Image: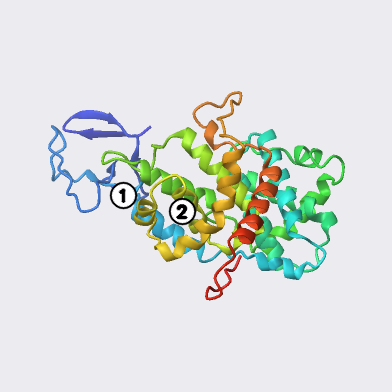
Amino acid sequence: MSVLYVSGIEFPFQNKLVLEGVTKPRVLIQSPEKGVRLHCDEPGHPATDPLVGLSPLPLLGSFEDVCSKMVSKEQNYRHSKSFLQKHPMLQPRMRSILLDWLIEVSEAYKLHRQTFYLAQDYFDRFMLTQANVEKGILQLIGITCLFIASKMEEACPPKLSEMAYVTAGTYFENEILQMELIILKALCWNLCPETAVSWLKLYFQIASMNANSDLLESQFSQDTYIQMTRLLDLCILNINSLDFKYRVLAASVLCHFLQQEEVEELSGLSRDAIQPCINWMAPFVESMSRFGRATIRDFSKINDDRHNIQTHTDYMSMLDDASENEVNSQFLTPPSSTEKTSTR
């Protein structure tokens, strides 16, 4: 280990930026907030000390930077329910059943919510690049998407054999590997979208922050968060959710738990941008209320992060109930003849 001598005092040379050929290494210290001048008046570290400099690492926890990068990334990942037009043998409910099953598998293997939402995004974007996919291979596509997502998100992803096992012998390991390569090529290896749940978590974090907090540590209520994620889960199973951008979906979920004006301010989205999604989401909110509140599940060896583990409930029954509510609402209160028919 290198040793640095300053004023005759020996310092172990750790946590310092050392470049080959640099004779005067610089001590890295935490970058201050933007626009704030660093003052270093501690003994041995005067403000003019040439050995002390700002860290070249970017400032972490800046909402403006985080949000702008997320919005920019969202433009590069396209999803649309129009993919069904390319697959005449498929029905919207088939997608719902598949995603519901992937949620169940995610809970069984204690996968994070982000892992499931990555898999959902991979599936929808992959189907948009294909044509005439038969329903017999939907399960293979779905489990492969979850396999890819788990390797992207999880510290200890399930083994390939475990993914093949949950298909109950329908598909084998080599088939999943073959499908993995097909999906990766179709997606051009673009595997890092901002998902609906990542937007929801960011927005709720901002809404729960105070003046002395930042984006790096969770500030929100875990109980409220799992109520929000259950609503988001239910909505994402419906193919019409693909009519909306993920950040609009997330903001609309938040509007059912917080004041809409507050959500508009923290998300930067206008009322016109989110109101159609809020209205579309109303039957799902009503359905969820009839099925009771969600509770935080206990998982072995998982404590602080348990609210981030994807959990399954009877989503298909809730989805059917929401669809019935939607039909009844349209029947009881038909739109005015002067109103345009809303797109779903």
Residue 144 visible somewhere in the drawing = no
Instruction: Using the rendered view, name the quadrant where residue 180 is placed.
Output: bottom right
Residue 87 visible somewhere in the drawing = yes
Q: Which residue is mark 1?
A: 22
- Which residue is farthest top? 300
Q: Residue flagged by tag 2: what amino acid is it? A: Ala
Q: Residue flagged by tag 1: what amino acid is it? A: Val
Can you give x and y, in whole percent of width and height, for residue 200 in the image?
Answer: 48, 48
Can you give x and y, in whole percent of width and height, for residue 281 in the image?
Answer: 55, 54
> Which badge, 1 or 2, is on the more N-terminal residue?
1
Of residues 84 and 323, the one drawn nearer to the viewer in this rendering: 323
Taking 138 as reference, is 51 left or right?
left
Image point (65%, 62%), residue name: 125
Can you give x and y, in whole percent of width and height, for residue 117 in the image?
Answer: 60, 49
Q: Which residue is mark 2?
A: 251
- Which residue is farthest right? 169
Image quarter of the N terminus:
top left
Per the image, label 1 sits on a secondary structure element best described as loop
Image point (76%, 37%), residue name: 162
Q: Give the spatial CA distance, label 1 vs label 2.
A: 49 Å
Per the image, label 2 sits on a secondary structure element best described as helix
Q: Could you classify mark 1 by the number of other residues whose Cα lies within 10 Å: few (under 14), some (14-19), or many (20 or more)?
A: few
Image point (52%, 26%), residue name: 303
